[in-house]
Image (cartoon, rainbow, N blue to C red):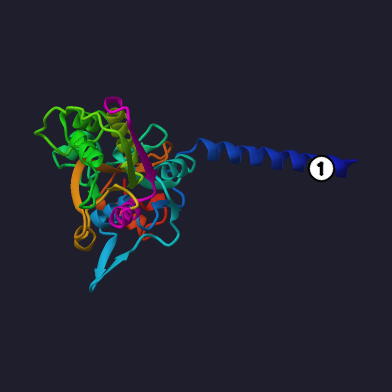
């Protein structure tokens, strides 16, 4: 009987300690712990711009080397990155400023908050252009849609959605009342803005159908080159080889927000810290200088 009581007491003590341990874990912030890097897939315009600006992308002769940590969790969309970071207290990722929501926390970079104003004045260093590309035989509908994007109405949609206007001198759009289809393919970061632009354009041109496929910047360039899409969306600068057979234009500027879980107490990072985190040189939050 005494033996049974001793075993029961030991079991209760173990359960109590286990519960206390769980309570401590669930209530703590990510001030320490293994850093879980979340990155985009190869071919992503966001990844290309992010790695270039932060110095994660280096040159080895004529070859470019992406030094993103081998243990990084790879996501194929902006939504995937946000979901991964919001569900993991120790995760860190990067997303388009225009796609940022309250489920994750954007940290300041070099003491500067990511915003439309700081992108516009250049004080926020993690920024890139949103480009569109098209072939030389673009349809009348395609040309008219591009005119709408660059119009006063189109650029207002850009600013209303937390991006920065690419054009400061604009004219009002006059609907051409065209009929037909338009195919737009490419960057998952540009897609939310493009959907807003397409929605507004179709209200003015109800007989036009615009199909938007979100599958990455490189895919958008390829589709425009091969003629399988009318317009490609690209969330980075084009290389000289990519641009030589295509027309291209900038439709907006966008910041790239470095995001952490809302329970993480990190609020500011330098560009060098971002680099060391995403290359895997620093692997624990306790090693990140506050």
Q: Quadrant of the N terminus?
A: top right
Count residues near mark 1 (Cα–Cα under 10 Å), then give few for <14, some for 14-19, many for 20+.
few
Check the image and report above or below for 84 versus 53.
above
Is residue 117 rendered magenta in the image? no
Determine the residue located farthest toward the right in the rendered image.
1
> Which residue is farthest bottom?
61
Disc 1 designates what residue?
Answer: 6
Residue 170 relative to residue 146: left or right: left
> Which residue is drawn at the image coordinates 37% and 53% (left, top)?
287
Quadrant location, the C terminus: top left
At a point 21% along the width and 55% down the height, the residue shown is 246
Instruction: Please identify the residue farthest to the top as the structure is shown.
Output: 203
Q: Which residues are magenta?
A: 203-227
Nearer to me, 82 or 131:
131
Asked if residue 154 is positioned above or below residue 112 in the image, the reply reads above
Percent x, y of residue 223:
33, 54
Residue visible at 11% across and 30% down? Answer: 171
The reply to whether residue 256 is in sight is: yes
Magenta segment includes 220: yes
- When asked about the image quadrant of residue 147, the answer is top left
Horizontal and vertical percent for residue 169?
Answer: 8, 33
Q: Is residue 66 above or below residue 144?
A: below
**In the image shown, does 193 or 147 lie closer to the viewer?**
147
Q: Residue 39 location in percent, x, y?
A: 39, 52
């Amino acid at each position: 009987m005494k033996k049974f009581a001793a075993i029961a007491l030991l079991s209760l003590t173990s359960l109590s300690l286990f519960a206390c341990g769980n309570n401590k874990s669930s209530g703590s912030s990510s001030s320490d712990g293994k850093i879980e890097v979340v990155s985009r897939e190869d071919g992503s315009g966001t990844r290309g711009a992010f790695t270039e600006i932060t110095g994660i992308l280096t040159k080895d002769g004529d070859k470019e080397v992406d030094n993103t940590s081998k243990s990084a969790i790879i996501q194929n969309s902006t939504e995937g990155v946000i979901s991964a970071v919001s569900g993991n207290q120790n995760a860190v990722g990067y997303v388009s400023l225009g796609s940022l929501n309250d489920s994750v926390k954007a940290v300041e970079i070099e003491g500067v908050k990511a915003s439309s104003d700081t992108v516009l004045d250049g004080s926020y260093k993690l920024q890139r252009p949103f480009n569109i590309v098209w072939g030389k035989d673009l349809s009348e509908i395609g040309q008219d849609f591009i005119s709408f994007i660059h119009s006063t109405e189109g650029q207002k949609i850009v600013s209303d959605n937390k991006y920065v206007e690419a054009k400061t001198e604009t004219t009002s759009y006059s609907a051409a009342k065209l009929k037909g289809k338009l195919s737009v393919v490419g960057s998952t970061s540009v897609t939310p803005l493009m959907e807003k632009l397409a929605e507004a354009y179709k209200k003015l041109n109800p007989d036009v159908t615009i199909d938007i496929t979100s599958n990455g910047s490189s895919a958008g360039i390829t589709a425009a080159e091969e003629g399988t899409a009318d317009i490609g969306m690209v969330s980075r600068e084009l290389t000289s080889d990519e641009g030589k057979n295509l027309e291209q234009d900038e439709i907006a500027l966008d910041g790239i927000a470095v995001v952490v879980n809302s329970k993480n107490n990190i609020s500011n990072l330098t560009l060098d810290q971002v680099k060391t985190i995403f290359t895997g040189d620093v692997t624990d939050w306790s090693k990140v200088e506050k």
